[in-house]
Image (tube, rainbow, N blue to C red):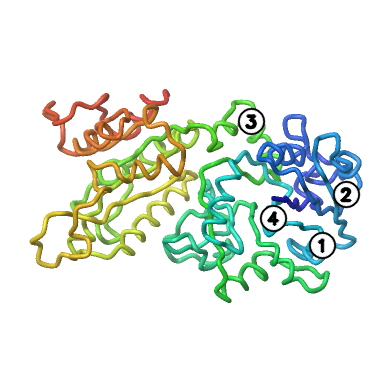
Amino acid sequence: MQAVIMAGGKGTRLLSLTKDEIPKPMTPVCGKPILQWQVEQLKANGITDIVMIIGHLGHKIQEFFGDGTEMGLRIRYIEEISPLGTAGAFYYLRPMLSGEDFLLVFGDVLFDIDLQRMIRFHRMKEAKATLFVHPNTHPFDSDLVVTDDDDRILRFDSKNNVRDYWYDNCVNAGLYLFDASICDEVTEPVKTDLEKQLLTGMIQSGEAVYAYRSPEYIKDVGTVERIQVAEKELASGYIAARNLQRMQKAIFLDRDGTINRKNRFIYQEDQFELEDCAVEAIRKINASGYLAIVITNQPVVARGLCEVEDVERIHNKMKTLLGREGVFLDEVCFCPHHPDKGYPEENPKYKIPCHCRKPDIGMIEDCAERFHIDLAQSWMIGDTTVDVRTGKNAGTHTVLVLTGDAGKDGKYDDVPDMVCSDLLEAVNKIIGG
């Protein structure tokens, strides 16, 4: 596997740091250029053949890295005499590629990722292009990626669009895996936009373009403020801990009565209202290093009250409302099944026994495998004893929150590790605060 780094940025927003004496990718973070952090991460993942696309003050990059020999790497350069956008340099790239696939990294992102997981996903999907996507703290002003249930990308939603709908917090992070044939789409060295021209064209023509979802750390550090945040996260060990080569800790959250106000069966989006404490509780989880994962039974589908798409729209409302407050969920899982038959409008397709319906642990097991979660170091928080039993079945610690009726009399089918008045109190007791 080879890597290509787009390292031609001028860095207007970083002039107070670069003084226009170094290119943007050479801006120091904790005393080390962004590019050096990237190159070291690539090497740690076994990628040692790198092509850097350089432009403004590109000679500074060449002077620093040379041909890469001293770092145990092979580094070559493509120099843009005039800016060619995010893909125009692909015209010159094709002869330098030796394999079927290559990794593309934008030169202003800091990342610590198990790239082999992404590569396996890319090859399993037989994708022509795979984009690393994740939730972030500001989806309302980010370009979003819209996917189907199989993670195939349907379209891009520009941050400049008017969004009059609830949306998934799914953001393109600036790291890609491509089939080398994408270079053949650039037939002359002219300014070309990777997303608007190449990727959108591939999607519209039906080619296999996928989104790889991961909670690992990857952030654009193209402003002074973002670099300051990244330096704190590096120093604390937060960034390295998010790499999926390392075991993760998660806080699994029930939905109804825990994150949102209980309103019997919620099957329409206008019925969904966040609990007052939900935003602050999830903000603390986001900062703690725990993953925030929703695990919820939604038998409204099996009962025939709504379709799977309606539940997904309700969940997009939840993600949108949380995103507006600068917080996010790493994953949302729901079970649409219900084993008991006899309801007038039930949907027989979902009236089946399953392994995902709580207190069974299929949803937790799936997340544990995908995100390398140590269940013994994780927690399940919910407002019913079914949630407590689910956590115990999965081997997690458990918290019962008393927003519902379960346990208020002090009687439990399964005794939780903690009993709290609401989600925020539970999170404070788990992580401190």
Tell me which amino acid carries mark 4. Phe
Which mark, residue 95? 1
- Check if mark 1's residue and mark 3's residue have beta carbons within 8 Å: no
Q: Between residues 7 and 365, which one lies in front from this camera angle?
A: 365
Q: Earlier in the sequence, mark 2 or mark 3?
A: 2
Instruction: Label 2: state its secondary structure.
Output: helix
Query: Disc 1 versus disc 3: distance between alpha carbons?
Result: 37 Å
Q: Circle 1 — which element?
A: helix
Q: Earlier in the sequence, mark 3 or mark 4?
A: 4
* Mark 4 vs 1, N-terminal side: 1
Marks 3, 4: nearer the viewer: 4
Determine whether 221 is above or below 91 in the image.
above
Q: CA distance from mark 2 to mark 1?
A: 21 Å
In the image, taking residue 196 as reference, residue 253 lies left or right, namely left
Kindly state the secondary structure of the residue where label 4 is placed.
Answer: strand
**Nearer the viewer's eye, disc 1 or disc 3?**
1
Residue 207 vertical position relative to residue 99 in the rendered view, above or below: below
How far separated are the C-alphas under marks 4 and 2? Answer: 22 Å
Q: Which of the 4 image quarters holds residue 417?
A: top left
Say which mark, if any, is on residue 102: 4
Select label 4 or label 2 by which is in front.
4
Amino acid identity at mark 2? Gly
Tell me the distance, in whole angstroms, between the alpha carbons under discs 3 and 4. 27 Å
> Distance between the Cα atoms at labels 2 and 3?
27 Å
User: Residue 58: which disc?
Assistant: 2
Residue 133, x across and y down, in percent? 55, 52
Q: Is residue 21 left or right of residue 33?
A: right
* Residue annotated with mark 3: 234
Give the residue furthest to the left.
342
- Mark 1 or mark 2, which is nearer the start of the sequence? 2
